Amino acid sequence: MKETRIYSLLNNSNKTKLNRFGKYLASPYFNKNNALLILGDKLISAIKKGSEPETNLVMWSLCKGSNIPYNDLKFRKLCNELLDRFENFLIIEELENDKLLKSNLLLSSIKNNKFETLAEKHISKSSKLIDRQADQSAEFYLQKHFYEKTIFNLKTDYEKKENISSTLNKLRFQDYSVNLHAFYVTENLRHATHMLFWRRMFKTDIIIDVGYTLDIIEKYKLGEFPAVKIYHLMYLIMSDEGNDETFLLLKKMAAEQIEIFPKSERREVLDALLTYCIKETNRGESGFYEHLLSIYDWGIDSEIMLENGFVSPTTFRNYVLAGLRYGSFEEVEHFIHERSSLLEKKYRENAMNFNLARVNFYKKDYDSVISFLNKVSYADVFYAVESRMLLQAAYFEKNEFDALESTIDAFTKFLRRDKTLETFKASGYINFSKYLKRFIQFKEKDYTAFIDKIKQTTPLYNKQWLIQKIEEHQA
């Protein structure tokens, strides 16, 4: 039973969704198959209790009766039927959350069924709903287009109705067309921004051409639409066509207009801002650390960066690292202790110990670094590699070269043996350990040539720290 897709989906659903799906199955309108009701009820009950589901054989008996012999093919079919019900349930749940789509579907149904008495009421109601809609990104303009299209189509059936005619008279083809263009432009810029992100992430040669999209923006003056303007700015800073002025304008507009985007898109806006900040800090523009931290604070305080109420360990680590590089040691330490409650419990202890180790490394308290790292579990591959890297650096700073060399050897063996790390990433850690070992053995006769070789090696993590230590030794 645990191997079925329906169990996997239900097991990953929250309690509220499980309860609502149970009510859905119990409704005769949506489900008339009592066997499906029993199967769903038993699965939901087991998941909520945290217990193992019954075996296929037991489930079959409960659903079909013990007098009917078990048939594996029919049982699988029953599970697939329950899966179909769950998929329909998800559609209904999504529809309930999309008021504009729901309103447009109602207007379409009114037209198709010729419910004249409902037409007047819901044209006015839909119009007010559009005027009050908070989210005004691409989907808003698409639904606004569908609304106006439906109103035009209603004219044929109800053109004698004075208030409908009045509504139609206020609509112009220009408005009708612009909404469709606004949807296309916003969605296309959003897609282009995504492609730019993946191109940068995976070093691909994806060709992205938004020339036609930009022509439409100029022709129809769509730059006045906040969502179009914001996605255009996002595209510019992600494509390297933007500059610091573009970034500051995007940050300002996002702070003022973030509410026009649905929750799923608000994170995309912040991610574009973060990406630009990180690019600039990597270029040595230290002033962008302040922007970086303020965007993280904004994203966490507003819950834009939270997933199911939690901050991810990656976001937590990135905030700490940015704060340390900015030099805000006390603020970062306060963040770790105060914000750790936003981490899921299963990640919390490891995240705190590792990040406190990082803080103490920057504070040059290397004994505390080692103490915190000894409490870190290596079950997560990130902690397994990054903790060992940090441990090597701490041993080096303490001049404990025997312990350092032993750690390097054990780490190198681990990296060559572990298959969960991509080859490229593993090479970056191996190269760091290799050069650090050569350095502490003092076998290099020409340190300038040694540094040049390090600079040319890719990938190599902690490159700047390694070069700095060699230069300090030269001096």
Image (cartoon, rainbow, N blue to C red):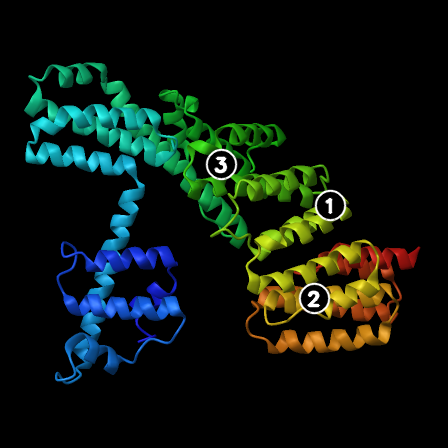
- Residue 12, percent across and down? 39, 63
* Residue on which the image places disc 3: 235
Secondary structure beneath dot 3 equals: helix
- Residue 304, percent across and down? 51, 43
Q: Which amino acid type is marked by label 3? A: Tyr
- As drawn, 213 above or below 174: below
Closest to the observer, 319 or 30: 30
Reading the chain from its start, which is encountered first: label 1 or label 3? 3
Mark 3 and mark 2 in contact? Answer it, CB < 8 Å: no
- Residue 321, percent across and down? 69, 51
Q: Residue placed at 8% from the left, 31% from the top?
A: 115
How many residues crowd around disc 2 within 10 Å: few (fewer than 14), some, or many (20 or more)?
Answer: many
Q: Which amino acid type is marked by label 2? A: Ser
- Residue 143, percent across and down? 27, 33
Closest to the observer, 216 or 285: 285
Closest to the observer, 223 or 452: 223
- As drawn, 74 above or below 203: below
Secondary structure beneath dot 1 equals: helix
> Residue lying farthest right?
475
Residue 460 seen anywhere in this rendered image of the structure: no
- Front: mark 1 or 3: 1
Could you give the CA–CA distance between mark 2 and mark 1, rounded to whole angstroms? 22 Å
- Front: mark 3 or 2: 2
- As drawn, 389 above or below 220: below
Reading the chain from its start, which is encountered first: label 3 or label 2? 3
Closest to the observer, 160 or 431: 160
Left or right: residue 232 versus residue 431 is: left
* Residue on which the image places disc 1: 331
Label placed on residue 387: 2
Could you give the CA–CA distance between mark 3 and mark 2, rounded to whole angstroms? 36 Å
Q: Residue placed at 59% from the left, 51% from the top?
A: 315
Q: Which quarter of the figure has residue 113?
A: top left
